Amino acid sequence: MIVLGLSGALRHDPSAALYIDGKLVAAAEEERFIRDKHAKQKWPLQAAKFCLDFAGIKPEQVDRIAFPFDEVGLFGSPARWHYAKRYWYAPDRALDGLLNGNRHFRRNRDGVIDMCQQLGIPNPAAKFVSVEHHLAHASSAYHLSGFKEKTAILGIDGKGEYATTFFGYGENGKIHKIKEFYDPDSIGGVYGALTQFLGFEMLDGEFKVMGMAPYGNPKRFDFSRLIYCDGKDLKVDTTLVNTIGLRRYKDEKGTGYYFSPKLIEWLGKPRHGDEIDDPYIDYAAAMQQLLEDVTLKLVEHYLGDILRETGKLVFAGGVALNVKLNQRLIEMPNVKELFVQPAASDAGTAIGAASFVAHELGDQVEPLKHVYLGPKFSTEECVKACEAHPSKPKFTVLPNAIEKTAEILAQGNPVAWFQGRMEFGPRALGCRSILGDPSHPGIAEQINLQIKYRERWRPFCPSMLDRAAKDILQTEHPAPYMTFAFKVADKWKDKIPEVVHVDGTARAQVVSKDTNPRYYALIEQLEKLRGVPVILNTSLNRRGEPMVCSPTDALNMFFGSELQYLVMEDVLVTKV
């Protein structure tokens, strides 16, 4: 069966994924093609075109169109009644939830069908299959994990149709639901509201809050009043956060936020600017601590018995990208292995919906092997992009690109590294990356200030050879996707200081020769020159922009920053 998964139900992060007979052959986010971060209010038209073209699939060959957003009945589920009851203070929203609660579904369905008609898929309405949003998240984690045992499933995000938090399990390929919580009782929503209060945008700023938190003291402020959780029940204080309507705080421009004036009365003015300042670093620490504590309580209550039985846990939803939370989950006594779907946010629901539908149709869904699922370009195409670029770049075709790149890195220079198929998901994993030597003092600050143009305190990630990972991270837990933080061994902290965060942890990628042989060879070559089997890795983009997709994107980014070296396949572009 050929199943095309499409995401974008919540009007951000639209993406496409293509399954052929249970194998994931292509996936990409729309933002990368249209150069608009998160591609808000867009459908994944270009991403879907890429997937079909890459696989050589004609539109008429598509058997099913899988979409991660479903209808929610007024009866048979407490979701819409819960929504109306909890939003009693906004009667128009409450009544709309009861009387017109599937308006978003209808709009989504019609938009996707219209987009599929543009793709040339015949009779798309007959092929359209909707999947509950959190079931799509669950499938993206469970079916791709490769776990054979009974597996605990966790899903946390802002919200889907109405659900915000999912607990379930997978067994023999089937997903079973144990418990869901509904809007406005959303852990992810509270984290998003505090993200706004701390001066960052939702969807991106949550990573910044997570990065800021280790600088603060989580015990200075007690944030438990934001969320009531006894381990079984979850209830958010909507007089402070997750607010709508007249309860929302509005700034002088009239922009509404997901927190109320009462939160400002308690915590003071919302934060502005790029510095990590008092008391906001302590607010970030307290919010991170609350997220971890509440999640672990709920996991123990709803999934504890399954974890004691098999020790296998999978996790998806936007909150699954919080690597500090994932570190706490791995450290739970009954968790033997945690799999986090690397594109865990809504972009990954394209994979989730497609894998769910493929499984329902009888296909054997293959475990995820890597996320190098996007476009690729040859050396010849990179040369043509250089020749056509208006900046007239200086470039040469290298006979020894790996050796030359390692030499440049060893001299203390950042290098833009554009190789192979683009990664799916928010993490650069060695194909669309900016790289540096983590043993070279000051390289992280240089990249932050002169290339990424972002806050100077933002941490960077280490990509490390698999044979060295156990010694550096003090664990054999799999970590191929930068989805976990680990404590770095003391003897390594001074060797790779540029990729160790202030709390002594690192969000690591363990690189294997099987999945990315070229990147592996580069790290090995740098090790020969500098003595460390680790490279500093961050995404190839500037602040506020999507990761680059094409050679032209890479050249535009190169000439829009203070980068001096860009390696695209075997092409070296320089400014010196």
Image (cartoon, grey):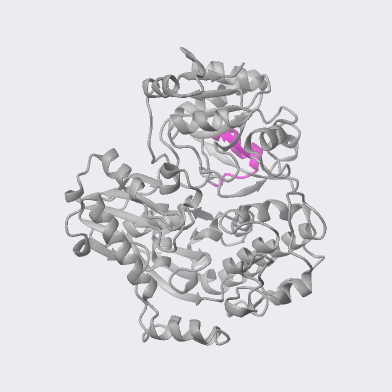
Image position, residue 229 (x, y; %):
63, 77
Rendered position, 494 above or below 13: above
- Front one among 527 and 305: 527
Residue at point 66% right, 72% down?
A: 249
Residue at point 41% right, 73% down?
A: 177
Q: Confirm whether residue 548 shows in the render.
A: yes
Image position, residue 117 (x, y; %):
23, 55
Q: Quadrant of the C terminus?
A: top right
Q: Confirm whether residue 364 shows in the render.
A: no
Image position, residue 310 (x, y; %):
48, 62
- Front one among 496 and 105: 105
Residue at point 77% right, 66% down?
A: 269
- Front one among 356 and 442: 442
Q: Seen in the image, is 54 located left or right of residue 317? A: left
- Tell me where residue 440 sits by quadrant: top right
Q: Seen in the image, is 293 located left or right of residue 548? A: right
Rendered position, 24 above or below 98: above
The boundaries of the magenta stretch are 461-477
Rendered position, 147 above or below 306: above
Rendered position, 84 above or below 167: below
- Tell me where residue 500 sits by quadrant: top right
- Front one among 240 and 227: 240
Q: Seen in the image, is 263 located left or right of residue 92? A: right
Is 348 part of what is drawn in magenta?
Answer: no
Image position, residue 306 (x, y; %):
49, 68
